[in-house]
Image (cartoon, helix red, strand yellow):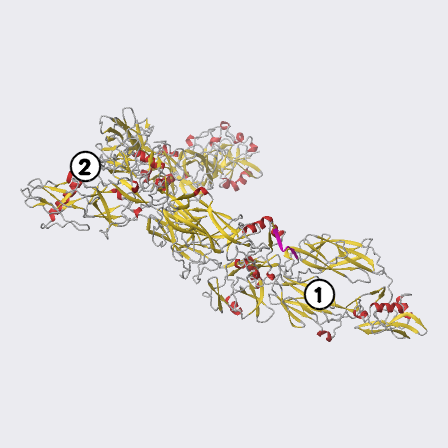
Amino acid sequence: MDRNRQVNKVVHFLLTLLIMFAVSIAPAQALLKGGTWQELNSVTGAVNGTAPLADGAIIPLYQGSTLLDPSKTHDIEFSAMPRDFSADATSTSMRAVNSTDTEGDLFSDPPTIAWENRQPPAMGLVWADAATPDTPLSPQPVPNLTFCAQNLAGRQLVAWAQVEDETNVPALWLFTRTGVPNYATIPLLSPKVALNIKPATDTPVTVSGDHVDSAFEASKVKVGESITLTISTKACDGTPEGNAPFVIRRKDAENRQGVVNNANPVRVGDTELTTTQTEYRGVTDANGNATVVVTQKEGPGVKTPLVVSSVNFPALTAETAVIFTTITSPDSDKASMYGHMIESATATLNGITYTFTRPKLAAEASGADKSVVDTNETWALFTWSGADNHCDILPDAEQLVQMRHEHSTLETWTGWPVAGDAEYWSSTKNQLSGYHAAVHMNSASVVRAADSDTLLVSCVDKAQPAAHPQITLSPQGPYKAQVGESIDLTMTVVDRDTQKPLPYRYMELFIDPAKNRKGEHQDAWDNLRVTVDSEGMSASSPEHYTGVTDVNGQAHLTLKHNSGLGVETPIRIVMPDDEGGNVELSFSVIFTVVTSPDVDGANMWGHMRGVVDAGNLYKRPLLAVEASHKDGQFSENNEEWATFNSVASATAQCGVGQVPDQSSLAHLYSEHAGGQMESEHGWPTEDYFIAADSDASGTVHVNLENGDSGKFTDTPNYLTCSANEMVAVLDVYFNDDPVIKNADAKVGEQVKMNIHSRNALNGMAIGNTDFTITMANGRRRDGLTTGFTDTSNGEMQFDDVGYVAGQVYHGITDANGDATIILTQKKGVGLLTPLNIAPVDSLISTPVSRSVKFTVATSPDTPAAKMWGHMADTITVGDWTFERPKLAGEVSNPLRTQDESNETWARVAHSDAVGNPDAGGCAANRLPRIDQLEALYNANSGGKIHSIQGWPTYLNYWSSTYQSATTWKLIALTNGSEFANSNVSIYASCLASDNPVAASITIEPVNPSQWYDGSDVHAVKVKKGETMQLKVTVKDVSGNPIPEAPFVLTRGDGYDRRGEKYTAQDGDDLQGIVTPVVIDGESLAWTTTKMGSQTGTDGTRIISVTRPDTHGTRTAINATLYENAAVSASIDTIFTVVTSPDVSVARMWGHMAPSLTAADGAVYQRPLLYAELSSTDNTASKQETNETWAVFHGPASEGANPARCAAGYYPAVEALDSLYSKYPSRTINTAQGWPVYYSYWSGSNSTSFSSGAKLDFYYAVDLADGSRRSENSATSTAWQYQICATTPLPQATQITLTSPQAMDDAIQAVKAKNSESIPLLITTTDAMGNPVPYATFSLKRDAGKARNPDYNKFVATNGTNMTVTPLTGAQQQFYYATSVLTGATGADGTLALTLAEPGGIGLKNQLTANLNDTPTATSSLPVVFTVLTSPDSDKANMYGHMPETFTASNGAEFKRPLVAGEPSSEAHTDTYFETNENWIMVNSFNTGNYGGCPMNQMAAIDDFTALYNDHPSGKVATDIGLPVGKRWWAGDSLLKGSTLYWQYKDLKTGKNYSMSENPGNYYLQLCLTTSRSGLNIALSSDAWNADKSAAVAKKGETIPMTVTVTNDAGQPQAGVAVLLTRDYAYSRGAVDKQYIEPGVIGEPVPFTTSPANMMLAPVAPAGTAVAFNNQNGLSTKWSGFTGDDGKLRFTLTQDKSLGLKTSVTAALANQFDEAASVDAIFTVQTSPDTPYASYWGHMPDTVQVNGVTLRRPYLKAELSAAPRDTWPFNNEFWGTNYYYQSEHVETSLTHLCGSQENIASLDDLKALQSVIGTLQWPTTSSWDYVSQDEGQSNKYYCSFNETTGQTTCTREKATTSGLGSCRVP
């Protein structure tokens, strides 16, 4: 009714305005859809006549209770819902437009309108876009979703009322009050109301990624890394929108130059965004946030824009971009792709780190000679000169090789180009002109390249340090071999300083002219030079070779002299030094000839054996120089041989019986016929050899060249002697087997060498034979002694003692001629080591050559290997046999190579690994699966695959197992780790036999119970959210399961329950497939999307299928063999949705439960589908979640339908709340599937706090969010969902007003701070005390009272403005004593309210609640809102909560200020009124304890400053409640110069003020909770005189004084203000003659005149000296601070002092009762140091003169009796003395001095004159000093005037007095 009245007023006002501004009456234009309308500009008069007329009647539109004027545009909050709008077609609400009567009949005001039969038609609202107002929105907005949630925020809409059943519209009548006829039918008008829906305060979806690079406006990471996107879904008000679905799709990816490149697209979560239409779907969490991971494992380096949209707002998108950079492109704007190629790489060589810059792109480089494309980038190529110009420093080969080694794995790969052979230029010089060394980055090999070649270039930051080559040869010399043999040397070049190898170093080798054993040279020998054979070494001439060292800084030199004549050849190795010089190593090689013996007398170097065995032993011929009995000599084979002409001379040379006879020589020849004696043994044979056979006819001789014999007479012959000495020879074999001449063993194993010494003549053992064993350099498989890394330098252990090449082992056989040696090579690298074993001191010294080979597991036993090895060619694990990886030498053209354990292995790409044996890969079906490699690893785990099997493990091994469509699994055989990749080159091991081939595939459910058969559908069915497990089996042609068999999965289209293809097309989703099939986490969004998988070890694969976003469709899943697409299998799957019931009339496949149980146990049947109704009367249908649901009118509606709830059976709102509580936060929809676009009717009447809602309003509950609203159920325009209760739905008689907050007993009220609130609880019950819900009440209040009942002058502007706020609903004003609020209790019969009084001034109020229906039922409650500006004190005027204590940021803790009546004394206090309180002020606080605390407890100025800084600009009033209208005294003073100022603070402005000397003004006082730390003061002086209890100094000197301030712990306190004052200065005794009496110490006299004045000079801290006086009782006050040591040092002077004592006092400036005093005395020399003196003095009492000690004269007061006369001198009164006088015996000198002799003599006094002025003893021309010397008689004495120097000897002893001085014994 209230709303109708409001409408009446509005319409009436509108009509009045139209009348006022109309000019003429115009015909009314019918209000059609989209048209305009006018109101009549006048009202007819009351006349008799015709039927009334009108243009029609308007149906008003409301938003809630607000009438919407159709002539205006209304701004609507985006958070509003269509359910908030309604049309009121009641006749009392409608208004006629342009009503008129032709004959002037009168209308009521407003004119009366009525519906036919008094029943308005059911009305609905129609919505359209304002731009197309005649086209209703399709679909129409959902009532229970906000405009924003329906993507309508920011839109301009129009809405109008429309009769729902246009076929049965009742007539609408207009009535007049007069005339007949008095009514007529008028049309129904529905003007469109323009509604501007406000834009959302935030976008419905936002997306942000981590790793944002602002330069690219994208998230950027490396390929293989991930980017985490954070998606936030928000409601239109900016608050998080939880559990909101969203979609991510991509746009075309582009490279860095903007070229589209969609290769290997990004994956969002498990979904590859294969095309720009592919979608990833997700749901945010309860807080509206979701994170998804974006990857692009094999991305080419592109930028991919990602578009995110909320499913709820598909047209509103957010966009971000992701970049996955590739290592093969640099981060350069010239690059084609986005990259992260390392700009520089480091390598550490010989302890120095070098930095290499990447090669330049062609677009970056100037002066490039060519270019090459590698991995999407174009790189610059240079000739060598171009490279040298391009780089400041071009790296040498060693640097490049080291860089390659350090960056050869996937983890350390630089990404730099490796196109072709990946050759990079180096600065290393080659031995050939026009060539330099280039480094193959794929293999780390160094090759010769022509300078004209164009290669890649990397520059280095610095060259290697200048090297100083040091050349060594192994073995060490001397080097000697037989002609025809070779000398193998290993040249090693290291840096002299670091001893590090110098690889790739250029060297020269010079063959110098040879010389014979005597040092002679012949030019003919120059053409017969030694030859050098070495890998990479070339000869420019026979005497000059050039070459380079290898990777280890070595070169293998094979020296030969096959044409040698037994000469020594000097050889020089010359290498350039990096500092411009050369390093040279000279050595010589000797190639011996068999034609010369190895004796010093030989001309040539030879190795002729000493004896020849031919059954007997024959000694070689002797050189001429060797023979002692020769007859001559003969030259043959460059030697001079001895000749013998007779048997006698021969016998003399050989010995008797030692010259062989003819038969012996013939036998010797026969054993070595055909010139063998020369060719094999080198003997000269051009002449005959003499025999022992001789007779008269001559002597027999035999020719050993041809066997001829004859006789001679006196002709020269060669001589051989028979040998009868012991000739030892050695038999050498191994492992006790004489057959084994050369030994093989594995590194680490032992080899036994057997040596047996025997006599060459008879074969008998010769014991104790010395022998030597010489090691040669170890040789790798190709015979080279270099080209491998051997940290042991080839060391072999002889009986555990290490020997290297060139070293000699010395041994001796035992007594049986046997010796054994155990040989090992513990660190061998696979070498064959030659050994030479020779006897010592044997005529047959020819060494025995043997070799020992120690093989390694890391080299296979194949000719292609570098080292000698025993790596097995295969490893068998179970039924599988694995072939070792291939060496590079076993592959025709390896892609890349890898050096490992001195072998070079082939690196293989996966494309070669699966079918290219020539490239190092496997034959078809021979590459192992990952499970097979896992078995290989498991059988050789823990590193055994390398340590025992010897396989290389630096790189991973390929498998044939697929990880994805483009990647395969690989394994690290070092630790079993598995990875996936596609574009790396690594090792490959092949199987010895084929793996089986797949022939068939099947797919079936793991759980057969999931099969569904019905309605011609055969499918596997599970619920959405569940996981369907399907088993895929792959078998070979024999039916055997095939493990690790790859296959492809695809999906089919989706079909609804009716069998129709489901095409809920959205955007560019051309296939109409809405939701993906997710298999094992992989999303199949399209029928074209393929997913790779493979079977397990048993030949099957269990795949897990989910449909997280399905709408309830049936979809096929297809499985196809990867390598044979013609073989496939398919299965239908159904994932049911909870949003559809499992009934045949449903559209989608569903599993909605038939009923739900609420939290209270009530059971409710699910809502009905529209197709399930038996009658559709008074119902409507609504589309939601792909189903059509029935909606109904509310409880107050009279429209009948069999499916409506019976009266009283609508569930209570609490029941619906219980249902919601069981399924909160939309879970009744998301988890149970119920529709929620519309609300559900309740049977609970609704009203609101302080509202006048109609009684026919009922709660409608939105089960999506639990919200409820009051809905007018009396109209037929509201449609909602309906469920019915199974049991039907009591009057309040009592009311209580309470507060959960406890009552404050002290003030008898519920109390809270005025910044807080007080909870109230209104409870309505029946007579039995049972709660009664929804009972209405009123709430009232009084004006309030102060705490002080006598105080009623408080200021209450806005200070009594209370508010009351229900838990839900708007805040209500409760300002005045006349205020009344109304409301109703809730479901539990209570209503919780919050009472507040933000501006409260501290009053007590009485609240009263009463029932509306029973006004006599009341309840009251007193409440107090305290104010911060009043303390909680019974002396306060108001109720307050000022804190009793509070703390500043400097740690100071304050007590609150006091109000009147709180101090114990009113002395030195006053009050100040502010904020309704009287605050205590103090003054003169430095003189006593006034107000709230003593001065030492008052806050210091720093405390106030800290407090102000914490609460600036007067915020202490608002933050703490302190008054700020007055200033505040500080408890510490301020020193300005030497004056003390008392400080005070203005807490409003923060300014500091001070007042000198006395704090006399009244200001506020703030006390600390505790006194400031107690301080102690002490005053001391270094001039302290304990006897005088004072500090003493002479006049003119200074007295130093020290003030020390400490705390209670005795610690010095710096910066403490100290106040110094002084007393009067006092004399020592009486100074007035009349008061001086003999023997009496006089009273001191004060001085205020200038002699008493002092000067005070600050010393530390230093300051300016000031006067320090005390006149008229007012001391000078001087103030200062202690220094860092807690001391104040100063000095005092009193330059005009008469000899005075002054008390000086030091006091703490801020602690008036803490002081210390010290007396200061300044002495004068004119006064003696005696208590009888008038002044303080230091006059000497005695002096030595004339050899005696004299005492000064006596003061008058020092005498026991009055002297004859008293003489004042220099402020002291001196007594005169008689020599002797009976009346003055006590003052006579004879008495005072003790005798006449002790009176000073005349000579004494004369001597005294010279010093008396210094002594300041009294002297004057008027008075003489008395001497003991007598005058003319003993009646007289002689006196001496110390002033004039005159002597007078006429002084009478008894009558003439003078000054006396006694001798002191």
Of residues 176 and 1438, the one nearer the viewer is 176
**Res 1821 visible:** no
Which tag, 1 or 2, sits closer to the chain's start?
Answer: 2
Q: Amino acid at mark 2?
A: Met
- The answer to whether any part of residue 1781 appears in the image is yes
Nearest the eye: 1590 or 840: 840
The percent coordinates of residue 325 (x first, y second) are: 45, 57
Residue 868, picture quadrant: bottom right
The amino acid type of the residue labelled 1 equals Ile
Q: Is residue 922 left or right of residue 615?
A: left
1776 up-or-down from 163: above or below: above
Residue at the limit of the structure toward the right, as seen here: 696
Pinpoint residue 1757: horizontal percent, then vertical percent: 47, 31
Q: Which residues are magenta?
A: 869-876
> Residue 690: which numbered mark, if any?
none
For residue 718, side relative to residue 1735 (left or right): right
Q: Which mark is residue 487?
A: 1
Quarter of the image that includes the N terminus:
top left
Q: Nearer the viewer, residue 247 or 1163?
A: 1163
User: Disc number at residue 1?
Assistant: 2
On the image, the x and y values in percent for residue 635 come to 82, 74
Assess disc 1: are there few (<14), some (14-19) or many (≥20) residues with their C-alpha within 10 Å of its C-alpha: some
Assign a secondary structure to mark 1.
strand
- Find numbered disc 2 in the image and state the secondary structure of the residue it sits on: loop
Q: Are marks 1 and 2 in contact (CB under 8 Å)?
A: no
Decide: few, some or many residues near mark 2? Use Cα within 10 Å; few <14, some 14-19, many ≥20: few
Q: Is residue 874 magenta?
A: yes
